[in-house]
Image (tube, rainbow, N blue to C red):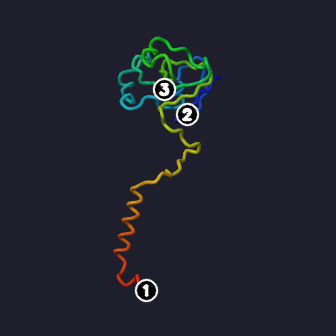
Amino acid sequence: MPKVRFLDEVVEVDAEAGETLLACAERAGVPLFRGFWTWGHRAVGCPRSGLCGACRVWASGADGALSPRDWKERRAVGTTGTARLSCRARVLGDVEVRTLPNRPAPAPDGRWDADPRPSKWQDRLRQKEAEIATAAAPAGADKGE
């Protein structure tokens, strides 16, 4: 049984051979329609025909892990690259899917470490707090009186 891994959501699903990526995502609770299409594809009654291109994902796997692109998919996403329409691409082998391009992979435990890069606003805040602390100190406190 082929496996479909949704990398951005850290979800792995067993797929039936020939099942579409969209069906796998819906079964796993992975949202593929974002922005306007969150409600628009339901309101319009998306026929899952590949004409709107709203269910675009980036899928990779071994050769033959996904069905070949049909003419509707070639028109929407082109003939090269990993972009696929989830309503048209059928799973034939193990596949890894990205639902949001260029998004960093989530931490395995779901927690994110603090950003180690320096932040200018934090430096300005510390400087301002130090100025306030020195201004509020009594005049004779510096000399030990």
Picture residue at 38% right of the left edge, 61% below the top: 125
Q: Which residue corresponds to mark 3? A: 57
Spatial CA span between label 1 and label 2: 62 Å
Answer with mark 3 or mark 1, whichever residue precedes in sequence: 3
Q: Is residue 87 left or right of residue 4?
A: left
Task: Give the structural element (helix, strand or loop) at label 1.
Answer: loop
Spatial CA span between label 3 and label 1: 68 Å
Spatial CA span between label 2 and label 3: 11 Å
Q: Residue furthest front?
A: 143
Q: Which residue corresponds to mark 2? A: 7
Dot 2 crowding, Cα within 10 Å, few <14, some 14–19, many 20+: some
Horizontal and vertical percent for residue 28? 54, 31
Picture residue at 37% right of the left edge, 84% below the top: 140
In front of the other: 8 or 137? 137
In front of the other: 35 or 145? 145
Identify residue type, mark 3. Val
Which disc number belongs to residue 144?
A: 1
The answer to whether the residues at label 2 and label 3 have Cβ atoms under 8 Å apart is: no
